[in-house]
Image (cartoon, grey):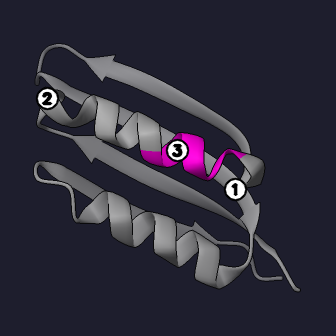
Amino acid sequence: METRVAIVGIIVENNAVICDIQNLLSEYSDFIIGRMGIPYRQKDIRIISVVLDASVDTINALTGKIGKIEGVSAKTVYSKG
């Protein structure tokens, strides 16, 4: 199966759902190369970047599940190959 490298950018505006995001990321941990979380206290939001190496379907599934969580936005950028 062909894989791609991608970055998922996540903005969390509802701190009550942090555990939901953490659980999802744990489910996909086999595909995660690295991740970084930044609390932006001035705006009371959390910014998370996740780098993955997985199939496009797997990356889309994760991004879609994260994006369905109330108060969370997620976007993905893919490598060309």
Disc 3 and disc 2 in contact, CB within 8 angstroms: no
Residue 50 placement, left or right of 65: right
Label total for image? 3
Earlier along the polypeptide chain: callout 3 or callout 1? Answer: 3
User: As displayed, is residue 33 above or below residue 67?
Assistant: above
Badge 1 amino acid: Leu
Marks 3 and 1, Cα distance to the nearest angstrom? 11 Å
- Identify the element where label 1 is drawn: strand
| Residue 40 percent coordinates (x, y) | 25, 20
Q: Nearer the viewer, mark 3 or mark 1?
A: 3
Judging by the rendered image, the residue that carries numbered circle 3 is 25
Earlier along the polypeptide chain: callout 2 or callout 1? Answer: 2
Residue in the picture at 62% in, 74% down: 58
- Identify the element where label 3 is drawn: helix
Judging by the rendered image, the residue that carries numbered circle 1 is 52
| Residue 75 percent coordinates (x, y) | 39, 65
Judging by the rendered image, the residue that carries numbered circle 2 is 16
Residue 68 placement, left or right of 14: right
Specify the quadrant of the image occupied by residue 57: bottom right
Marks 3 and 2, Cα distance to the nearest angstrom? 16 Å
Q: Nearer the viewer, residue 37 or 25?
A: 25
Marks 2 and 1, Cα distance to the nearest angstrom? 25 Å
Q: Residue 26 colored magenta? A: yes
Q: Specify the principal SS of the magenta part.
A: helix
